Image (cartoon, rainbow, N blue to C red):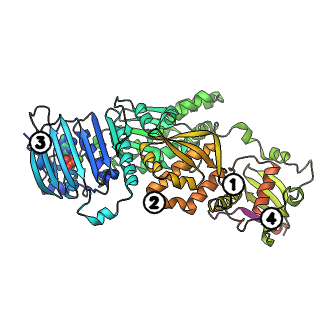
């Protein structure tokens, strides 16, 4: 007896907008979710030409009853719900009965499948929605779908597909996410005859993370374990050091379903607020388990968003689970303060939000921040002034002490950088200058960013050498999705001075880097580049944005003490530029406060 029924019109109408098959990755996601719903423990995906020409998905799940094989391709045919009420508390990944119908309508699909008890397997061939052939097949228990020539009959959709390797990257990405949500299932992805992803399927999330992101990432993570009786949160997160420039490595699951959620990302942002720099994002793989009744999964066509009945509870659980983990980590590394503060710190993560007052938050935040801002950086401002030879030696005019005189380019406006007097540095971030009748504040990062940006432009234009050979090559580990993109775009990175070679199946050896970047900036620069290629294609790498990013990485950071020589060098380099007064993003490099403005503040005039 078959298990699949066709939902009646009324039920079908209550299900949110139809499944959208946009690209090979959508086919893989839907098919693999079906395999998971069929209790498979081993799922393999093979693609060719990024999946546009060929996708094979094979599982060892429960298989199709012979009555079901053709019916399954009907619209709204599903074995997972019978009526709309079943949607409440649903635990399967699928429920709309639309995926197979939508896929078969736009491609050439062959299905072979056998249940445990059936003597023979079944075979069905459907192309462009029409039945071509049915029959029996001798096959192992489980199901195998072969999907060929996606969008062969819908040229409009075909046109929107990206290059093969970009599509292959999307497929790898989709499978990575599903694999992380299901460490108990072994996944394999083969792309153009090369195995690009393989997870052990032993039930252990860390091994699964290791097989996707490599040893270095996996070994730097902290385990999250949190249970407050109605919600459990488990997974792994990075400590304060490991940070990325985008959220690509923040992955959330709710009851085993990979979702995007503003609520959860903001809980993460809150948790890391005091310990990561702005624009930096931690690595996060978190699994939220909650009574399915409390989650509505029927809100998004691709099922990638959910709605929580009690948002604040979920937020709090995630916030606490992460701060608990970070907090324990900090506790091992930093000695504590007073008894009273110690009490606040120790009880903070366990206490309920309404019980906590402002002082508790402050103490706790201060505690988390200690590691980020070592004592030396917190020395009072007046001490910093002493280190600049303003009192001991006469103040210096840049021109006097410049070893190499600036080049020809001089306009009247730029004199501010050459004819000024350096007063000192404040907040480890701003340089104070006196020029004519003004007090000038210069943002050291913005200034240096402008300088670096101009240098990079000359390098990319071939006017100056960019590359610097490394004595010891750097090895970077990439996820299968990133790897797919990288190996097809090596020459683009070469233009920016990064000479890479494939190494093994998911890492690369870097032999040279742009002279202006340090080795520690390279991984994040490459990852950002890959994310940009995936989003907007390889040509986007040539955009100004890449130059900005590189300039930003190369520039001295705020919060760094500069010595007089470094300050001089910055002023000197600015003085020969055409646009020294703004950073490449358009923020000001200097602010002038005129003498009369100062006098007004003092009510002298
Ligand atoms: P849904 O997953 O929403 O039920 P689909 O169109 O994806 O709808 O699949 C239709 C039905 O086909 C499923 O309900 C399930 O019974 C069956 N099915 C699909 N894939 C598999 C598989 N790999 N193994 C066993 N049954 C499957
Ligand atoms: Mg499905």
Let me know if residue 92 appears in the view: no
Which residue does the image show at 18% across and 48% down from the upper left?
110
Residue hosting label 4: 407
- Residue 174 belongs to magenta span: no
Mark 2 or 1, which is nearer the eye? 2
Query: On the picture, is 169 further left or further right than 87?
Result: right
Q: Main secondary structure of the magenta part?
A: loop
| 410 left or right, relative to 43 | right
Q: Which of 369 and 66 is in front in this view?
A: 66
Q: Where is residue 187 in the image (x, y as percent from the top left)?
A: 33, 37
User: Residue beneath label 2, please?
Assistant: 536
Identified at 65% across, 59% down, the residue is 459
Lower sequence index among marks 2 and 4: 4
Q: How many labels does the image show?
A: 4
Q: Residue at x 54, y 49 (%)?
A: 526
CA gap, disc 4 and disc 1 = 23 Å
Cα distance between the residues tagged 2 and 3:
42 Å
Crowding at label 2, few (<14), some or many (≥20) Cα neighbours within 10 Å?
A: few
Q: How far apart are marks 3 and 1 (CA)?
A: 66 Å
Q: Residue at x 45, y 59 (%)?
A: 537
Number of the front mark, 3 or 1:
3
Relative to 46, say whether 418 is above or below. Answer: below
Residue 580 in the image, given as x and y percentages of width and height? 72, 65
Label 2 with label 1: CB-CB less than 8 Å: no
Q: Distance between the residues labelled 2 and 1?
A: 28 Å
Q: Do the residues labelled 3 and 1 touch (CB within 8 Å)?
A: no
Magenta stretch bounds? 583-593
- Quick one: 576 or 593, which is closer to the camera? 576
Q: Residue 417, image x and y in percent?
A: 80, 63
Give the number of the disc on residue 445. 1
């Amino acid at each position: 007896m078959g298990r699949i029924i066709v939902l009646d019109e009324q039920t079908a109408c209550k299900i949110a907008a139809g499944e959208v098959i946009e690209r090979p990755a959508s086919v893989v996601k839907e098919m693999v979710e079906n395999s998971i719903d069929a209790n498979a423990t081993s799922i393999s995906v093979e693609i060719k030409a990024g999946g546009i020409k060929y996708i094979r998905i094979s599982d060892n799940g429960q298989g199709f009853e012979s009555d079901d094989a053709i019916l399954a391709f009907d619209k709204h045919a599903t074995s997972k719900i019978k009526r709309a009420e079943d949607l409440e508390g649903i635990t399967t990944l699928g429920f709309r009965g639309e995926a197979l119908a939508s896929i078969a309508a736009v491609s050439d699909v062959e299905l072979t499948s056998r249940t445990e008890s059936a003597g023979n397997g079944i075979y069905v061939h459907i192309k462009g929605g029409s039945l071509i052939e049915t029959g029996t097949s001798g096959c192992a228990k489980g199901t195998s779908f072969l999907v060929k020539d996606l969008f062969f009959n819908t040229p409009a959709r075909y046109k929107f597909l990206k290059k093969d390797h970009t599509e292959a990257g999307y497929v790898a990405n989709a499978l990575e996410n599903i694999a992380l949500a299901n460490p108990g299932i072994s996944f394999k992805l083969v792309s153009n005859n090369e195995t690009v992803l393989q997870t052990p399927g032993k039930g252990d999330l860390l091994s699964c993370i290791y097989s996707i992101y490599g040893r270095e990432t996996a070994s730097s993570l902290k385990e999250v374990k949190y249970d407050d009786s109605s919600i459990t949160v488990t997974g792994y997160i990075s400590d304060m050091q490991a940070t990325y420039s985008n959220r690509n490595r923040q992955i959330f699951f709710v009851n085993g379903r990979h979702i995007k959620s503003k609520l959860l990302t903001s809980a993460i942002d809150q948790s890391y607020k005091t310990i990561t720099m702005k624009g930096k994002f931690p690595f996060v793989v978190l699994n939220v388990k909650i009574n399915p009744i409390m989650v509505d999964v029927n809100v998004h066509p691709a099922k990638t968003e959910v709605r929580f009945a009690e948002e604040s509870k979920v937020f709090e659980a995630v916030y606490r689970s992460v701060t608990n983990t970070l907090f324990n980590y900090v506790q091992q590394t930093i000695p504590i303060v007073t008894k009273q503060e110690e009490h606040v710190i120790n009880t903070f993560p366990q206490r309920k939000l309404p019980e906590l007052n402002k002082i508790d938050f402050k103490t706790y935040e201060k505690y988390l921040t200690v590691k980020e801002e070592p004592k030396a950086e917190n020395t009072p401002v007046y001490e910093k002034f002493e280190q600049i030879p303003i009192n001991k030696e006469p103040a210096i005019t840049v021109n006097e002490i410049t070893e190499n005189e600036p080049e020809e380019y001089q306009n009247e406006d730029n004199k501010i950088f050459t004819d000024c007097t350096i007063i000192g540095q404040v907040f480890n971030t701003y340089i104070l200058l006196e020029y004519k009748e003004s007090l000038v504040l210069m943002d050291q990062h913005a200034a240096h960013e402008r300088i670096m940006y101009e240098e990079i432009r000359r390098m990319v234009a071939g006017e100056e050498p960019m590359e610097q050979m490394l004595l010891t090559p750097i090895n970077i580990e990439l996820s299968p999705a990133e790897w797919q993109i990288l190996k097809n775009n090596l020459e683009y990175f070469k233009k920016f001075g990064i000479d890479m070679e494939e190494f093994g199946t998911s890492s690369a050896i870097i032999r040279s880097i742009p002279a202006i970047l340090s080795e520690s900036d390279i991984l994040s620069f490459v990852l950002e580049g890959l994310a940009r290629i995936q989003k907007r294609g390889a040509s986007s790498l040539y955009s100004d944005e890449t130059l900005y990013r590189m300039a930003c990485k190369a520039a001295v950071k705020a919060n760094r003490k500069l010595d007089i020589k470094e300050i001089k060098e910055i002023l000197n380099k600015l003085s020969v530029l055409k646009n020294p007064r703004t950073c490449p993003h358009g923020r000001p490099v200097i602010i002038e406060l005129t003498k009369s403005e100062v006098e007004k503040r003092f009510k002298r005039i």
